[in-house]
Image (cartoon, grey):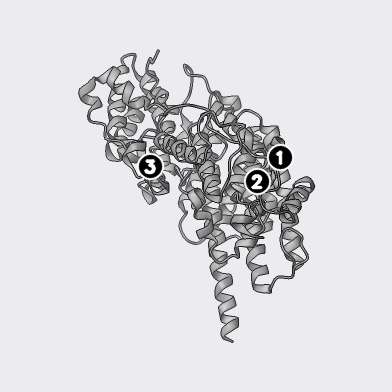
Amino acid sequence: MAEENGSSQRKSETTQEVTKEMEADISRYFENASRTIFDEIVSSRKEDFFDVQRGSGSRVPDFELLADQSSEFLKGGSLLGNERLDHSGTNDVHRDVWIPSEQTRKILRSVATSTAGTTFLDRENLTMPGLAVQGDMPNLIKSTVARFLGEDESAQRHVLTASDVTQDERGLRMLIQAGCYKAAINLSGRLLAVYGQGYGKINQSSKHSPHSLQLWYTRLALLTKLRQIDILENESKPFDNLDKPDMYFTFYPELYGTRPGSMASFSFRLLLAEIPMYCGKPKQALDNLYKVLATTNQIIANFSAGFNGDGSRVKINPAEQDDAIRLWKGRRSRILISIVNCAVSMKNYVLGIDILERLCESANWTPEQMDALRASIGRLHLFLGDVVAAEKFLIDIHKKDSGPTVRELIDRGLMAVAHNSFQEAYKCFQAAEALDPSNIALINNMAVCLLYTGQLKTAVHLYESMITRNPVRSLQESILLNVCTSYELHTTHCKQPKLHLLSQLNRYKGDAVDIQCLKLPLN
């Protein structure tokens, strides 16, 4: 009986772990560097409401689609090795499992049966990464403040740099938590140099470890967030699809004995598959993601048959089997979410809807998670211009005795926007903001509605009040771009209020904000 209770408790804990991972990673991928439907809608003209415009001069401020999510990228537990903590109940072998290609499998078998130090591989079978840039990334906010506001104002800036923290993983965490992503990239470069993978080391052989690969994952995730595309593309290329022999534990028998599995985390594998999407190659990213999905499905099938995930005919006990299947099904859901974002970036909304519908049927979601998935389907129907279908997902699902939730009010507001009923939309967003006063995206949506109803001065005042009340959370790139666009629509004398925003950035934010969002003449 005690054993049965223990099994039940372990199953419950594992379910919670996977659910926690799903929530963290769903929000992370919805808040990626490339904008998707889960980030915003931009309206430019009545007949094509959902056409995303990038123009600077005629740009219209953005509606935030996921107004109940904000800036969760890089806050998930998978950075810097925490993926292991999130699944502490899962056997290491099952968590790290991956199915190598036949060529890699042969090389690993050869390494395992040879005397240590006698196996020498061609360069094409080795992973040889290195830094693509020399020196530190500059702090553009500091230099811009000095240029426009003077050295006295620049001296008011107290932001962590790579040299201000411990030169280790703990220092990286501090920089990321402080929003100093450029400084974290700089520190990651220093730490990778210790592994012989610094500047100029691309295509030079070096040893790998789970720690070095986690450093690379953190660095590439930060580069993705900051949209440093050239560096991202060059530094991610040597890893390919993480299938070369030196990416597996068995390549280093002197360190890991016969331990099987991949040294690279699943999160790293997924990020590498997605990177082409951020580099303007969404079709390649889609191909990569479907390959990862195919391997993941095979791993789930192997576990379901009672064997190890890599297909080796070793029986595992039922408790481990349940934990492993649950973990890998959660990972499969993460892949499908990435495929949705990739499909949306290609404007393939039909594929996005199909994947989301499959997701709805593929797991035991909580009511809140199911509502979020269905709401995403509804918003994709809006992109297709099918307002009737969208209403079935955004409105009809909310028939409850209790009052409407924040998400329900947001959905109603978005439906009103689709019908060009901006006053009604404003009321919905205002009601949602009353339930969630700290939600910056909701106030942004209210301000955009005011702009569309000709209340420009009121919209500007709402933005300024929001920033004054909560500068740390309000000074986000998308919000600042909206504010500066509103200033330009409001008056030709908009430089001074923009400089005030620059002063606020200088005092309250790290180094991650793209200074161009203030639309100041930087050249």
Q: Residues within 10 Å of mark 2 (few under 14, many from 20)?
A: many
Q: Amino acid at mark 2?
A: Asp
Q: Amino acid at mark 1?
A: Asn
Q: Amino acid at mark 3?
A: Leu
Label 1 to label 3: alpha-carbon separation: 35 Å
Label 2 to label 3: alpha-carbon separation: 30 Å
Q: Is residue 496 visible?
A: no
Q: Residues within 10 Å of mark 1 (few under 14, many from 20)?
A: some
Spot occupied by residue 427 in the image (x, y as percentages of width and height): 42, 41
Residue at the spot 38% in from the left edge and 14% down from the top edge: 521
> In the picture, residue 143 is in which quadrant?
top left
Q: Is residue 292 visible?
A: yes
| Location of mark 1 (residue) | 125
Mark 1, mark 3: which one is toward the viewer?
Answer: 1
| Location of mark 3 (residue) | 175
In the rendered view, tell whether residue 497 sits above or below residue 125: above
User: Is label 1 in a helix, a strand or a loop?
Assistant: helix
Evaluate if marks 1 and 3 touch, with contact meaning CB atoms under 8 Å apart.
no
| Location of mark 2 (residue) | 246
In the rendered view, tell whether residue 355 sits above or below residue 298: above
Evaluate if marks 2 and 1 touch, with contact meaning CB atoms under 8 Å apart.
yes
Residue at the spot 69% in from the left edge and 38% down from the top edge: 286
Q: How many marks?
A: 3
Spot occupied by residue 328 in the image (x, y as percentages of width and height): 65, 58
